[in-house]
Amino acid sequence: MMNFLGLGDEEDEEEEVMEEPSSFEPDQDFANATRRGTVLNLHTQKQVRVILSEPASYDDAQLIADHLKGHRSVIVNLHRAPYDQALRVVDFLSGCVYAIGGSMQKLGHNIFLCAPENVDIQGTISEYLAGEGRAHLR
């Protein structure tokens, strides 16, 4: 009763703790640890989305910028846009990509990949189709 009220000797408490047997059973301890362990989801990354866009004019560039702000990569095909509008779109998007710390790469004639900062682009697309390379493909 004295120990319950905190008036007992501390030595008695230490002896009681030391008297408890310490048995180690690896199989049982492993089973208990795995039951109490943390469950990890192997699919922690959310699905990556790439947007395909064919802007017809400069007015469509803001929608592409909104996708970039939402951390989605955009492939921009400027074949439908008039030349002067396509230049304005590329200028606007290059500024947007710079502002968010992303990158922009030319994939082909009038086709660009705009990627936010969380996407790493590796490799390059060569200009093989321009000039002599085109004759070899026919």
Image (spheres, rainbow, N blue to C red):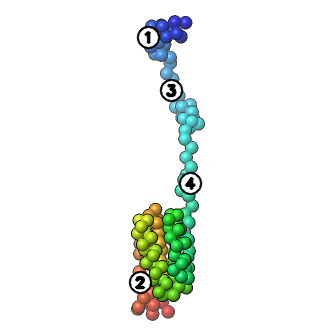
Mark 2 is surrounded, within 10 Å at the Cα level, by few (under 14), some (14 to 19) or many (20 or more) other residues, namely: few
- What amino acid is labelled 4 in the image? His
Residue sitting nearer the eye, 97 or 113: 97
Asked if marks 2 and 1 touch (Cβ < 8 Å), the reply is no
Asked if marks 1 and 3 touch (Cβ < 8 Å), the reply is no
Q: Secondary structure at mark 3?
A: loop
Viewer-side label of 1, 3: 1
Q: Which mark is residue 43?
A: 4
- What amino acid is labelled 1 in the image? Glu
| Alpha-carbon span between mark 2 and mark 3 | 68 Å
Mark 4 or mark 2, which is nearer the start of the sequence?
4
Q: Is residue 127 visible?
A: yes
Instruction: Place residue 130 in its image quadrant.
Output: bottom left
Q: Secondary structure at mark 1?
A: helix
Residue at the extreme front of the image, as rendered: 59
In the rendered image, which residue does mark 2 sit on? 127
In the rendered image, which residue does mark 3 sit on? 24
